[in-house]
Structure formats: structure tokens, C-alpha cells
Image (tube, rainbow, N blue to C red):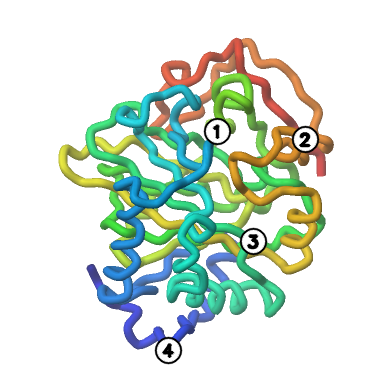
């Protein structure tokens, strides 16, 4: 674990450099080093592991596998996904990671940014189907006029291509239209996961970051991650997201909490802005490293949505 951020951590704050703010604006994401110290991370890691050990009760679909449908046996999970950990363990509310993220989101996007939700994502080693498919976060959320978003991805482990690090397609947050997305298993009631297209000219960039580092990305930045092909290394990440106070209040007013247990009509609330069309086959590439996603996704069951500006 590097500690390049030691001089920039000042209590609950982490001080950004001007070029990092510019990187977020132009690329749609930024890598920040050493947002948490080893001591700070160790304390949070203990709480993280209590979820993986099933010591904290999590309701229904908030504990699931993002690579599969809801029927997959727990022991076979390839991408362990835990939504809203601070709901199920209130001790986590206002933790040092959340506070540092709040200070960063304020520097990036303004003083009215507030906590929206949190999430734990863990890939065990040696799982050949642990692909987190390409997506833009906004495809999962209600569409709002205010697009300001700071989604933080904290590395609990050193994150490399080998163990399935997050990857971004730079500049996609500036595209006029949202990419096409469709339910991975054809039905949002069977699986929460959406998949988007990776165009031929897209150039994904792996974000290989160290334990204690974070990436921060925009709600429209296309991203995903490959399998954990290592034999002994987990890839654990902790997500927190900040959006404007007005946006979060709107979400809650329609019953949208980011829980996978939210009503299906609420989860699909943004689809009132979308027009569906069925995909029979497509010759482009979805998955990382130009792999054919047909081994992950049945084309004849996927419903894609198109968002107009």
C-alpha cells in the first residue's frame, strides 16, 4: 500500500490538486492516491468482512451476485454485491471514508453534494464468469436534470487487471446520448444487472490502483470490470456515491433508495424516458478485451433501452 496521499489528508478532508479536478471534468473519472491510511482502512476492512462472513443480516436482493440472476447459489457467487451496508450496519454512517469522499465531492462539484448510497463489491479469485458488464450508472437510476455525480470506488485490495480492476472508457460522460442498456438476463425481476454496448472505437483504460486509493467517476462514464483470474487474490471494493441534495430528495420522494428491493416500477422509473427495442444479434463487442459477450449474455432475450437527450 502506497501512502502518497499522506500530506493531503487533513482530518476529514482530502485536498485535491487542480489537475485532478480537470481530469475528472475531461475524462469522466480520476484516480486519487492514498485517500485512506492503512490504519483507517484496517478498521473499515473489519466491518467489510463482517458482511462477507454473513455476520450482518442483509435483506433480500440487497445481497446478490451482479454476474448472475437471483437464483444463483450463494456459494457460487462470482461478484458479491451488498447494497446499502450503512443501512444494515448503522455504525458505518459518517465513517472516515464517507467524510473524505464528501470533501472530495464538494471540491469537484460544489457544496450541495450529499451522500446518496453505499455498496460493497467483492470478486473471489478464480471465477471465470465474474464480469461486471459495461454500464453507465445513470442507466440504473431515475433521470434528473442535475447530472452532477461523484461515485467513489475504494480499493480494499491492490486492484489490477489480473484480479478484475475497474476499467473506464474516457470521455463517454460527454456523449450526447446514454448508451444502449438492457437487462443481462432479459428481465429486471430476475437479475438487477444491465449491460451496455462497447463500440469498436472505444478505448477502455484499466484503473490499476493500490489499497487505500480511490477512483471517482461521473454517472455517464462507461465502465466495467473483467474476471478475477488470480488464484489467491480477492478484489474487494467499497462504493459511495454523492449527488446533489435536490437529486437525492427527488429519488427518495419516488421511493428510489438504490436498494435492489425497491419496487420494480421504481427501479425502472427512468425508463419512462426510454424507448425499447429488441436485439436479435449484434456484431460489435460488449465485453472487456474484445471478448464475445454471447458467452455471458443471451442475445435473443436482451431488451435494450435508448435514452434521448
Say which label, 2 or 4, has the lower sequence index: 4
Q: Which mark is residue 10?
A: 4
Residue at image coords 50%, 71%: 98
Q: Residue at horizontal 35%, vertical 79%?
A: 5
Q: Alpha carbon of mark 1 to alpha carbon of mark 2: how far?
A: 15 Å
- Name which of mark 1 and mark 2 comes first in the sequence: 1
In what element is the residue under mark 2?
Answer: helix
Circle 1: element type = loop
Does 275 appear above or below 103? Answer: above
Q: Quadrant of the N terminus?
A: bottom left
Q: Which residue is mark 2?
A: 271
Residue 214 position in % (x across, y down): 41, 64
* Residue that appears at 30% across and 30% down: 75
* Figure quadrant of residue 181: top right
The answer to whether any part of residue 29 appears in the image is: no
Q: Which residue is mark 3?
A: 149
Q: Are marks 1 and 3 in contact (CB under 8 Å)?
A: no
Q: Is residue 183 left or right of residue 144?
A: left
Please indicate whether residue 286 sits to the left or right of residue 35 in the image: right
Residue placed under numbered mark 1 in the picture: 193
- Taking the image as shown, residue 266 lies to the left or right of residue 46, namely right
Please name whichever residue, 188 or 166, is drawn nearer the observer in this view of the structure: 188
Percent of width and height locating residue 139: 66, 41
Separation (CA) of disc 3 from disc 2: 20 Å
Q: Quadrant of residue 103?
A: bottom right
Left or right: 298 in relation to 263: left
Q: Provide the secondary structure element on which disc 4 rests.
A: strand
Q: Is residue 272 visible?
A: yes
From the viewer's perspective, is residue 141 above or below residue 295? below
Q: Residues within 10 Å of mark 2 (few under 14, many from 20)?
A: some
Q: Which of the marked residues, 1 or 4, is nearer the chain's N terminus?
A: 4
Amino acid at each position: 500500500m502506497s501512502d502518497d496521499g499522506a500530506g493531503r489528508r487533513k482530518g476529514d478532508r482530502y485536498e485535491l490538486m487542480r489537475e485532478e479536478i480537470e481530469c475528472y471534468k475531461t475524462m469522466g473519472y480520476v484516480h486519487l492516491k492514498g485517500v485512506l491510511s492503512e490504519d483507517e482502512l484496517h478498521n473499515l476492512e473489519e466491518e467489510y468482512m463482517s458482511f462477507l462472513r454473513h455476520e450482518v443480516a442483509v435483506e433480500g436482493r440487497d445481497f446478490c451476485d451482479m454476474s448472475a440472476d437471483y437464483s444463483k447459489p450463494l456459494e457460487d457467487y462470482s461478484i458479491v454485491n451488498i447494497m446499502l451496508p450503512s443501512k444494515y450496519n448503522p455504525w458505518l454512517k459518517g465513517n472516515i471514508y464517507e467524510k473524505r469522499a464528501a470533501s472530495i465531492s464538494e471540491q469537484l462539484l460544489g457544496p450541495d453534494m450529499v451522500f446518496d448510497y453505499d455498496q460493497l463489491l467483492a470478486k473471489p479469485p478464480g471465477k471465470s464468469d465474474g464480469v461486471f458488464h459495461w454500464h453507465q450508472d445513470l442507466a440504473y437510476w431515475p433521470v434528473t436534470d442535475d447530472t452532477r455525480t461523484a461515485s467513489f470506488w475504494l480499493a480494499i485490495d491492490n486492484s489490477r487487471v489480473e484480479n478484475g480492476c475497474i476499467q473506464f472508457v474516457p470521455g463517454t460522460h460527454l456523449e450526447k446520448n446514454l448508451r444502449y442498456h438492457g437487462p443481462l438476463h432479459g428481465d429486471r425481476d430476475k437479475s438487477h444487472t444491465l449491460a451496455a454496448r462497447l463500440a469498436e472505437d472505444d478505448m477502455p483504460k484499466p484503473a490499476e490502483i493500490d489499497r487505500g486509493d480511490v477512483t471517482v467517476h461521473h454517472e455517464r462514464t462507461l465502465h466495467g470490470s473483467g474476471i478475477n483470474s488470480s488464484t489467491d487474490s480477492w478484489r474487494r471494493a467499497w462504493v459511495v456515491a454523492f449527488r446533489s441534495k435536490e437529486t437525492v430528495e427527488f429519488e427518495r420522494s419516488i421511493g428510489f433508495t438504490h436498494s435492489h428491493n425497491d419496487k420494480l416500477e421504481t427501479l425502472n422509473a427512468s425508463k419512462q424516458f426510454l424507448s425499447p427495442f429488441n436485439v436479435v444479434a449484434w456484431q460489435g463487442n460488449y465485453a472487456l478485451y474484445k471478448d464475445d459477450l454471447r458467452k455471458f449474455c443471451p442475445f435473443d432475450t436482451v431488451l435494450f433501452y435508448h435514452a434521448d437527450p
